[in-house]
């Protein structure tokens, strides 16, 4: 049985103080942050992080995707191994101040705490490096796909493909990173394990009355675009029967996509999150509509079936409305199972440290999903009030943050130590 880990109170105070500090970068009047990837607000937050890392003995590295790494040497006599911990600093437009930031802040202070405990001989260590990772553009708000930096790092997106992604204004990721001074050339160490702490974005922890949980698996996703082509005509004199209204076709698709999820009794979630129309004039029948559709489920078969259903349903709506509809896949996100051995080990440690925890699944995407494709990864969730996220109302209490920090230190201690049985 592991001994309970005792953490200096000053480290917890550092976590809360840093959370308050990061809330200032891109702060909105509603109490959230507006910190789109590679924006000037993101630059300010990144600069603060880099300065903090350098002030606290970390070696700062920036890779070609703008990911920031802070490498802290724990023990140079150990074989070349690195324990990674991190999350992201970018936000949704007018998003919350905890999503992503909490994971970066905890990763930073946890590194110092861990080193302090190792240096004092309080825990055994088998790693050479501890690495704070801050991933570029997790949110997918300004540049798509989401999980951009971690996707590149995991080898699931090439440098050229990443650089050529553009935002709504046609600015490439390469240009945007260069503009804020974060187009790096460094190669970070290879991760042997990755831990991410993140707010839950759901109510399971709140319903259970618990502060933290370990995520065992994620839902998969299918992200698609439907392009609908109708015919531009005068909205007045054109007889109703001859109109080819792309927005009417789009509206029917939106209702059907919602209906499919409603009938699945919550095994499938669906959404249409973006609708572009042309010419978007009050007096012209809509000639082009583009829909951004998502299906999410824990069941791959259900996701494949949803994609096929969309094709059939689009064909029917195409016949009804006279519009041409084409379907394109933007992203296939497989169901991911997190490393069971590491999760089991960490769960035992949390139990012996008297930190009650829940086993959870995640519907939302997280950088840890990308990391799990290259190294054993662990995703820890922290209670988020009313399960709200991506809005200024997002809230996690100081006491839950402190418990999450305790749990992170317990988890990281278990990972670096060889004393605990696997
Ligand atoms: Zn996030």
Image (cartoon, helix red, strand yellow):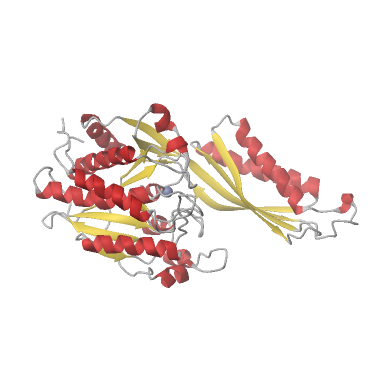
Task: State the count of labels.
Answer: 0
Residue 312 appears in the figure = no
Which residue occupies 42% across, 72% down? Answer: 178
Residue at the outermost top position: 208
Residue 51 drawn at (x, y percent): 28, 64
**341 sits to left or right of 199:** left
Instruction: Tell me the quarter of the image containing the C terminus.
Output: top left
**Between 389 and 156, which is closer to the camera in this rendering?**
389
Which quadrant of the view contains residue 189? Answer: bottom left
Residue 85 drawn at (x, y percent): 29, 50
Residue 41 drawn at (x, y percent): 43, 62
Question: In this rendering, is residue 184 above or below 57?
Answer: below
Question: In this rendering, is residue 117 above or below 204?
Answer: below
Residue 6 appears in the figure = yes
**239 sits to left or right of 321:** right
**Between 358 and 338, which is closer to the camera in this rendering?**
358
Which residue occupies 37% across, 37% down? Answer: 215
Residue at the outermost left position: 121
Question: In this rendering, is residue 318 above or below 202?
Answer: below
Which residue occupies 59% across, 39% down? Answer: 305
Instruction: Tell me the quarter of the image containing the N terminus.
Output: top left
Which residue occupies 25% across, 55% down? Answer: 131
Residue 376 drawn at (x, y percent): 30, 45
Which quadrant of the view contains residue 302? Answer: top right
Residue at the outermost front position: 29
Which quadrant of the view contains residue 339? Answer: top left
């Amino acid at each position: 049985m592991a001994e309970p880990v005792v953490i200096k109170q000053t480290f917890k105070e550092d976590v809360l103080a840093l959370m308050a500090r990061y809330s200032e970068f891109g702060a909105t009047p509603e109490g959230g942050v507006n910190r789109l990837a590679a924006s000037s607000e993101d630059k300010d937050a990144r600069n603060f992080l880099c300065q903090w890392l350098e002030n606290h003995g970390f070696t700062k590295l920036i890779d070609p995707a703008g990911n920031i790494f802070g490498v802290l040497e724990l023990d140079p006599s150990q074989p070349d191994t690195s324990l990674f911990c991190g999350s992201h600093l970018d936000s949704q437009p007018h998003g919350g101040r905890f999503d992503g930031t909490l994971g970066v802040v905890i990763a930073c202070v946890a590194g110092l705490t861990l080193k302090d405990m190792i240096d004092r001989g309080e825990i055994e260590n088998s790693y050479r490096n501890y690495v704070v990772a801050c991933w570029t553009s997790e949110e997918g708000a300004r540049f798509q796909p989401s999980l951009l930096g971690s996707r590149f790092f995991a080898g699931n997106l090439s440098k050229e493909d990443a650089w050529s992604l553009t935002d709504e204004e046609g600015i490439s990721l390469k240009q945007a990173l260069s503009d804020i001074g974060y187009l790096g050339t460094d190669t970070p160490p290879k991760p042997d394990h990755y831990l991410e702490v993140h707010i839950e974005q759901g109510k399971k922890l709140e319903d259970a009355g618990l502060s933290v949980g370990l995520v065992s698996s994620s839902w998969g996703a299918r992200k698609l675009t439907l392009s609908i082509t109708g015919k531009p005509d005068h909205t007045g004199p054109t007889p109703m029967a001859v109109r080819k209204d792309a927005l009417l076709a789009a509206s029917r698709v939106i209702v059907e996509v919602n209906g499919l999820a409603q009938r699945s009794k919550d095994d499938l979630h669906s959404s249409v999150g973006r609708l572009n129309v042309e010419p978007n004039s009050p007096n012209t029948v809509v000639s082009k509509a583009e829909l951004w559709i998502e299906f999410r489920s824990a069941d791959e078969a259900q996701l494949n079936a949803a994609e096929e259903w969309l094709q059939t349903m689009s064909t029917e709506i195409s016949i009804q409305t006279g519009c041409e509809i084409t379907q394109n896949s933007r992203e296939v996100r497989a169901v991911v199972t997190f490393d069971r051995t590491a999760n089991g080990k960490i769960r035992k440690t949390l139990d012996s440290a008297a930190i009650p925890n829940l086993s959870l699944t995640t519907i939302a995407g997280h950088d840890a999903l990308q990391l799990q494709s290259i190294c054993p990864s662990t995703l820890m969730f922290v209670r988020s009030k009313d399960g709200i996220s991506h809005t200024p109302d997002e809230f996690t209490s100081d006491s839950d943050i402190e418990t999450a920090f305790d749990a992170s230190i317990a988890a990281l201690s278990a990972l670096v130590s060889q004393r605990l049985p696997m």
